[in-house]
Image (spheres, helix red, strand yellow):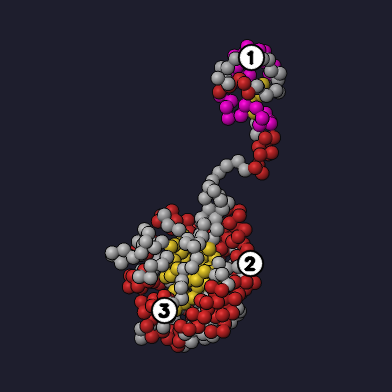
Amino acid sequence: MAEWPPWKPADAQGPARVWVVAELGVNHDGDPRKLLQLVEAAAESGADAVKLQVFSPERLLSGSAELAGYQKSGADDARGLLAGLAMPGEANRQAAELARSKGLGLVATPFSPQDVAELEALGLDAVKIASPDCVNPVLLRAAAGLGLPMLVSTGAADLEEVSFAAEWMRGEGGPGSDGHFRGGGALLHCVSSYPTPDALAGLGGVAALRDRYGLPVGYSDHTPATDTGALATACGAVVLEKHLTLDRTAPGPDHRASQDPDGFAEYVANVRRAERMVGPITKQVTPIERDVRRVARQSVAAARDLEAGRVLTADDLTVMRPGTGIPAMRFEDCIGRALNTGVKRGELLPTALLDG
């Protein structure tokens, strides 16, 4: 089990450490061997964790279930599509064991309360709730019963619905007496479009959710770009979820919104660079700035030759480089002070002027 939380948000002491989750989803195309290959690829690409999906078409779909537009290519009906993509429990257990052996964290998404029982055998670090279920109290309550942290996606949800989901994320410990979750986790901003175009990535939603709910926030990324995770990191995301595939051109619902292993490695590298660039959440003079600060800042100087004993007026003073004398921001403090020594035009005033 990963130490929780596995991410480290940026603060005044140091830069962020974002948890990058490789969403394997259904990109195995129903082949257990591909699922293991995806776990291997996730480890080699620098992911921190992998995410599995656990579902049964019979439990998930009613007789009137439909396909979303992005799912229709190569599929006749929703039940037929999902029947070919459901992964046997033993295959998921093997994938979980392989992930652990590679040092990867482990997350899984259930889609019905009955799926939750299968998750217990996997030894998860967290439970992921897919966007459509962020307003599903039946599934939320069942998943909360595991006592694990929850990652709740919020795609296609308005703020009232996100508020409903956020109530399940508050507090500490196990499920409360009301059945609501008390184990922590994160809300994931998400745009439920596969793939999501750049102009609709909505990364401002990361900061919006963080500021509104005061919870850790991440981004479930469906864009085809390799720099979106880095941009989300700059917006305050502490966990990222990105689909991983072995072949972006393969038929299937999620391949086009995914990255192949090379692209995923670039994605992770961009995130790590963004972590370094964001740095601590503070504003201070850094060592690298000190030389420029010294020579480029301005100090209070004499605008004319000034004799000892003169009581200074604004007309006597100017500001000039370098910043080694009385700081320019203390210009007004010098007015009305008497000089103890003469100062030539263009010389910095002695810092002792403001002593006492």
Q: Position of residue 213 (x, y in %)?
A: 40, 56
The residue stretch that appears in magenta = 304-332
Q: Position of residue 262 (x, y in %)?
A: 64, 72
* Location of residue 217 with respect to 120 vertically, above or below: above
- Describe residue 306's horizontal placement relative to residue 62 as left or right: right
The residue identified by callout 1 is 340
Instruction: Tell me which amino acid carries mark 3.
Output: Glu
Is residue 339 visible to us here? yes
Viewer-proximal residue among 251 and 30:
30
SS class, disc 3: helix
* Location of residue 238 with respect to 42 vertically, above or below: above
SS class, disc 1: loop
Instruction: Tell me which amino acid carries mark 2.
Output: Glu
Q: Position of residue 91 (x, y in %)?
A: 50, 83
Q: Position of residue 305 (x, y in %)?
A: 69, 16
Label disc, if present, on residue 103 of the rendered structure = none
